[in-house]
Image (cartoon, helix red, strand yellow):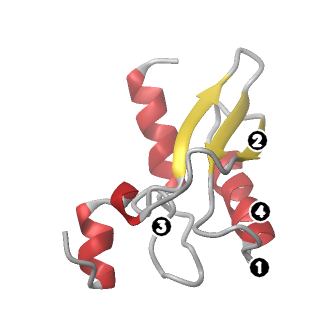
Amino acid sequence: MDQALEENLMGALENVIDPELGIDIVNLGLVYGVELDDEGIATVTMTLTAMGCPLAGHIEQDVKRVMEDLPEVKDTVVNIVWNPPWTKERMSRYAKIALGIPD
């Protein structure tokens, strides 16, 4: 997968907003990677801010929804992992400012 396509996929994921925090999952640092195979199957490897997040299903559906809008993507698999664990250090500067977290 070339860099332009990866940036396009990550750009689409910026449209998925964490409903509790009001910031997109990319800037929150929840997306660890995205891959697209030759059959058009996108695999999004990501985490959540906490285990047992009550909105996990909602976020997963939003990920699939934004990815299906891309012509290269035929289907999406969301792979939620817990290692490495998410920490606020993964957040972008934008997200930290928006949430009032010191850099």
Instruction: Using the rendered view, name the quadrant where residue 56 is placed.
Output: bottom right
Q: Earlier in the sequence, mark 1 or mark 4?
A: 1
| Farthest left residue in view | 103
Residue carrying label 3: 24
Q: Nearer the viewer, mark 1 or mark 2?
A: 1
Relative height, residue 69 to residue 92 (above, below): above
Q: For numbered disc 2, what is the local secondary structure?
A: strand
In front of the other: 44 or 88: 88
Q: Which sits earlier in the primary sequence, circle 3 or circle 4? A: 3
Q: Is label 3 in contact with label 2 (beta carbons under 8 Å)?
A: no
| Residue at 56% over, 45% down | 84
Q: Which residue is mark 4?
A: 61
Question: How many angstroms separate mark 3 from mark 2 (CA)?
Answer: 18 Å
3D distance between C-alphas at marks 1 and 3: 17 Å
Q: Secondary structure at mark 4?
A: helix
Query: Three-letter amino acid code at disc 1?
Result: Pro
Question: In this view of the protein, which residue sits in the foreground, 49 or 16?
Answer: 49
Residue corresponding to mark 1 = 54
Q: Residue sitting at 52 percent across and 18 percent down?
A: 1
Q: Position of residue 66 (x, y in %)?
A: 64, 55
Is disc 3 placed on a helix, strand or loop?
A: loop
Q: Label 1, label 4: how many angstroms apart (C-alpha)?
A: 13 Å
Q: CA distance from mark 3 to mark 4?
A: 14 Å
